[in-house]
Amino acid sequence: MPVDEAVPVARGLRRAGSQLALAVSFLTILPVRVRAPGSLGGAAAWFPAVGALIGALAGGVRYATEPLVGPAAGTVLAMATLVVATGALHQDGLADTADGLGVRGDRERRLAVMRDSATGAFGTLALFGWSLLLLTALQPLSNAEALAALVAAAALGRWAALVHAAAAPPARPDGLGAGFTLGRGALLFATACAVAIAGVACGPLPGLAALGAALAVGVLSALAARRLIGGRTGDTIGATVALVELAVCTTLLAVWR
């Protein structure tokens, strides 16, 4: 390859590597060094791929521990891995969103409550419900099915968060929701990754069902955010991830049973 053609290719690979590193740094607790940080919207192209790795880690924990402690405890350990690996990023968003939507008042009141770091009654109930339903959905699955479900759920959850961000305007002029500008190219690449991951992990028909569940939650959460608080925030994006993980695992349980 001529030098004048190799240089743009090398730059493109370095840029892709930096975007991947930024996605890993944002979505996980791994201390990844980002040498040339760009916009989070560009890094969003890698969100489903990073999500698949997170799901594979959680599914691997279930696979390794289930023979020792049984499916219930193994599933709890897998869920704990899912939460710890992300620093409870999405569970925090779910709790804050539930608190904001549960309070009485106008949009400004709801947004103010969502910014409060304290977790209220609605947030606590949302986290309890999420944990209980996810445990119920994953426990009956075999180790191989649980691994596939967690890979697909984690990947599709982060893809649906992009759908949510693309379908709802920012609710505030500042914050993560306002700063998260998603390009069409990043969304298309993320969509291709999500479809491929779901199909390979679960098979064509179960993967399609999981994809449909993720899309439905992503669109409905965007519509609800637009109506109730005027658009997206970082919390609603995180809540979408958590809700889609639950929806995908529940859908796959129904399909496989």
Image (cartoon, helix red, strand yellow):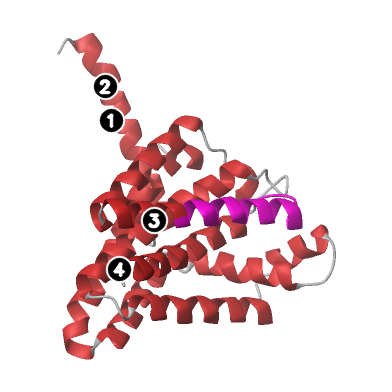
Q: CA distance from mark 2 to mark 4?
A: 43 Å
Which secondary structure is most common in the magenta stretch? Answer: helix
Which comes before the other along the chain, label 1 or label 4? 1
Q: Position of residue 189 (x, y in %)?
A: 38, 36
Helix, strand or loop at mark 2: helix
Where does residue 256 sit, x and y in percent of width and height? 30, 68
The furthest residue to the bottom: 69
Q: Mark 2, mark 3: which one is toward the viewer?
A: 3
Residue 209 image label: 3
What's the residue at 55%, 68% (across, down)?
92
Q: Relative to 124, is 107 above or below?
A: above
Q: Amino acid at mark 2?
A: Val
Q: CA distance from mark 1 to mark 4?
A: 39 Å
**Tag 2 residue:** 9
Are the residues flagged by discs 2 and 3 in contact, CB closer than 8 Å?
no
Q: Position of residue 112 (x, y in %)?
A: 76, 63
Magenta region: 213-232
Which label lies toward us, 3 or 1?
3
Residue situated in front as seen by the camera: 172 or 122: 122
- Asked if disc 1 and disc 2 are in contact, CB closer than 8 Å, the reply is yes
Q: Tell which tag, 2 or 4, sits nearer the viewer.
A: 4
Task: Say left or right for 149 vs 231.
Answer: left
In-image side of 208 versus 157 (left or right): left
The amino acid on which the numbered mark 4 sits, given as a three-letter code, is Trp
- SS for callout 4: helix
Tag on residue 256? 4
Which quadrant is the C terminus positioned in?
bottom left
Q: Decide if residue 32 is in sight here.
A: no
